[in-house]
Amino acid sequence: MHTEVEFSLETKVASGKGAARKNRAAGRVPGVVYGPGLDAQMVTFREQDLVKALSTPAARNVFLRVRSPGSVLDGTRVIVKDLQVHPVERSFLHADFYKPDPTKVIHATVPVRLVGMAIGVKLGGILQVARRDLLVACLVDDLPEAIEVDVTELSPGHSIHVVDVVAPEGVRILAEPKLTICAVIGAGYQEEATEEAEGAAAG
């Protein structure tokens, strides 16, 4: 099951620069919640709450179950659609939260999770990762926390491409099929070349 965490929001948002400064001083960040059948709702939230939510394995794809007693948002499930971060301080400036329609396909970027120890690495090669995430299309309830790629049989000089990846049920990978995910390079080639040269010399 996809990761879901409770997330508190306040909907009674005062306007004006003074209110914004007061919110930031209290560690609260402005945001907006929107989605099908929902009028945009201006909100504030505690920065540390979102930091904690994003630290789960699902990262940006975590489902947030809103806790906002007395508001239309209470109990709503949302995802982080956009997050503005200060370029220097790395603090959150603003967040867009989206309430997805469970019957509609969404597009999302999910991380690639490599599984196993490649044969080529055991032979002394180096596993080179070319792609750490992939764009997928699926219903929101089918959204995976990651796309697992088994590298166990990957030998020196070989690579795994998008076309080789088996997506979870209900998930379609939108990346170019020929795109390289990872490859084993290095020592494997050198060892094979050395063995061939020694064999030729002995012959």
Image (cartoon, rainbow, N blue to C red):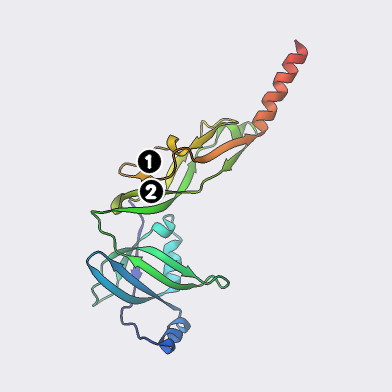
In the rendered image, the residue lying farthest to the right is 201
- Spatial CA distance of label 2 from label 1 is 9 Å
Instruction: Please report contact status of discs 2 and 1: CB closer than 8 Å, yes or no.
Output: yes
Of labels 2 and 1, the one closer to you: 2
Q: Position of residue 97 (x, y in %)?
A: 35, 67
Nearest to the observer: residue 85 or residue 155:
85
Three-letter code for the amino acid on which mark 1 is drawn: Ala
Q: Residue at x 44, y 55 (%)?
A: 57
Q: Is residue 77 above or below residue 72?
A: above
- Whether residue 105 sits left or right of residue 148 in the image: it is left
Q: Position of residue 67 (x, y in %)?
A: 30, 71
User: Which label number is shown at residue 167?
Assistant: 1
Nearest to the observer: residue 142 or residue 16:
16
Packing grade of label 1 (10 A; few <14, some 14-19, many >=20) is: some
Q: In which quadrant is the C terminus drawn? A: top right
Q: Residue at x 67, y 33 (%)?
A: 187
**Badge 1 element:** loop
Residue 3: name its quadrant.
Answer: bottom left
Q: Is residue 74 above or below residue 188?
A: below
Packing grade of label 2 (10 A; few <14, some 14-19, many >=20) is: many
Three-letter code for the amino acid on which mark 2 is drawn: Val
